[in-house]
Image (tube, grey):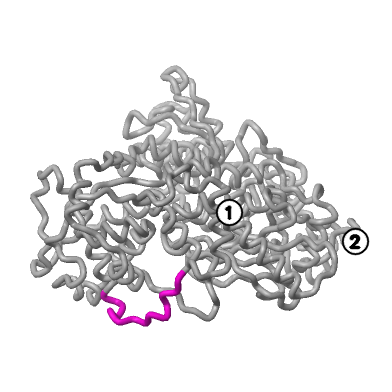
Amino acid sequence: MEENMKFATVEDTVEYCLFLIPDEPRDPEEHREILQKYIENIMTQFAPMLVPYIWQNQPFNLKYKPGKGGVPAHIFGMTKFGDNIEDEWFIVYIVKQITKEFPELVARIEDNDGEFLLIEAADFLPKWLDPDNSANRVFFHHGELCIIPAPKKPEAVSWLPTTVQTISQALNIISTHPEKILASESIRAAVNRRIRGYPEKIKASLHQARCFLPAGIVAVLKQRPRLVAAGVQAFYLRDPIDLRACRIFKTFLPETRIMTSVTFTKCLYAQLVQQRFMPDLRSGYKLPPPSHPQYRAHELGMKLAHGFEILCSKCSPHFSDAKKSLVTTSPLWAGFLESLKKNDYFKGLIEGSAQYQERLEMAKNYFQLSINRPESSHAMSPGEEILTLLQTIPFDIEELKKEEANLPPEDDDQWLDLSPDQLDQLLQEAAGKKEPEPVSKGQEENYDLTQVSESMKAFISKVSTHKGAELPREHSETPVTFDADSFLNYLDKILGSRPHDSDSDDLDEEDSECLDSDDDLDLETQEPGEEASVKGTLDDLKSYMAQMDQELAHTSIGKSFTTRKQMTASDNSEEEDSGAGGSVMTPVDVDLNLVSNVLESYSSQAGLAGPASNLLQSMGVQLPDSTDHRPDFF
């Protein structure tokens, strides 16, 4: 790993590192043994949560990584989470808890987007922190998010480096000043809100559904429930070449199908349900009519069987036996099993019972994937693992059919069809916002539309760069300030004197300061030749603008805007104002046109999400529901 801890840019991948806080100089081999012991203790202590978890692609794993350059030896893990973003946030929870249970460890975590923890708390970050200077500053320590600050001036703080620190420097700062690097409460709350509910949330993320499956798949899933993810992914990502193997099934014959209950994650279940697919007539898989009460079970089973058949078709039936290493021969297995018993992993089940054996097999599989992984060996593919299980585990189709009468009830899948109100509520909860109070009819009638105008002015007056525009806070919290003298003085330097009644957008104090920068045009300090050149350019510009005004005066473009005269004059004012080009041009009512256009856009959304509501809500403005196609607030 490089000095600045750049992570591999693998798609949908999260990487996590655990460092030991420097204590005393250690021999490299001694350091390695200490970290290996931490790996065993971590994986054992968190096994009750990690063993039954169904991962979308890859499981949580840890391994020793030697030091390189300025990065000391550490514990490293990488997980490809694919389409299930909850896998990534579950890993954040695990890493956070590891630093809480093992206070000697400091953790860093990133994904292919970089510092995604900072992205989650983007609304609360200090202004100095950006992607260019965030390297090696964000850590978990003692179960809390920490951000190493940057000094405002060089050598302002003795214990802070003036440049981007290395990992070793960061670890020294964390060990000597842990109380000074704690992230602000709002930043920590934003991250904690995203992982709120674990580990109980794991159960809520699962979905049980009945499937009409071949007996071989039922037997495999009894031993390896996690393989349902590989089966769903194989079907979900199928291509025409994969489907050639499903024209005639060789491994999972349709005549062996039985009804069973399968546990999916909600992400896997949604991927399987939302796919439209009709099997090849030669495959033998036929579906009952959609009106059949078991149609969904037949459809799910058919799709999952195709996924398992695709997996098995990608490996030779005579694959190497060298990969079939026995877990129980590992010197680490005995200690791991004893630790599981101490942590009540088996939940008081009688040793040798069917349920005990199921949990034991899951523990063996977890041990093989996450702990006992020699670097020189190549792990079995899901297809090879399925074929191995079919060869080694005995199963009786008749016995499996007897279990059909005692299947657990299916879970309700209404969560697949969220109403717009439920979706809005979920989005607001995810953003940490309270549900807005309903607007009563009386409040709608007395709604102050000046809030819309003022909020838009505040947004326009904010400084924007190539990185984006800064949204103002809620209108009630941060009123916009405007230094009229500074603004007019600046305009006088450019355009000369201007009428006092001309319209201008508000600017806040920060923008006023920006106008006084070295880049401003200062006519007083110009050389005589330069001053004349600039003055001539400005005169040409004003002349050009005047000609444009005369041209536009002969068109109807002015009628598309509401002017102040139209709001105060009589009904025939429009006729008087549409005369020759020499007539006095009435000023446009900027506020009225702005609000009218925003309300037109909001009304055209027809209650759905759109640019007007999204922009206003981000600025703390909640419009009442539109009851007409055209707004008539005026």
Q: Residue at x 36, y 41 (%)?
A: 608
- CA gap, disc 2 and disc 1: 49 Å
> Which mark sits nearer the N-terminus, 2 or 1?
2
Q: Which residue is mark 1?
A: 339
- Image coordinates for residue 127, horizontal then vertical, percent: 71, 52
Is residue 620 depicted above or below 150 in this figure?
Answer: above
What is the secondary structure assignment of the residue under circle 2?
Answer: loop
Label number found at residue 483: none
Could you say which is closer to the camera, residue 121 or residue 141? 141
Report the number of numbered marks.
Answer: 2
**Which residue position is annotated with label 2?**
155
Q: Is residue 408 above or below residue 390?
A: above
Q: Nearer the viewer, residue 605 or 599?
A: 605
Q: Is residue 244 left or right of residue 617?
A: left
Indicate whether residue 301 is drawn in magenta: no
Q: Which residues are magenta?
A: 313-326
Against 623, is 496 above or below? below
| Residue 90 shows up from this direction | no
Residue at disc 1, secondary structure: helix
Q: Position of residue 274 (x, y in %)?
A: 27, 54
- What amino acid type is highlighted by mark number 1? Ser
Displayed quadrant of residue 292: top left
Q: Nearer the viewer, residue 133 or 2?
A: 2
The 10 Å Cα crowd at callout 2, few under 14, some 14 to 19, many 20 or more, is few
Callout 1 crowding tier (Cα within 10 Å): few <14, some 14–19, many ≥20: some
Query: Which quadrant is the C terminus positioned in?
Result: top left
Q: Residue at x 59, y 52 (%)?
A: 45
Q: In this view of the protein, can residue 416 be seen by the observer?
A: yes
Badge 2 vs badge 1, beta-carbon distance below 8 Å? no
Is 14 displayed left or right of 133 in the figure?
left
Q: Please, what is the three-letter code of the amino acid marked with disc 2?
A: Glu
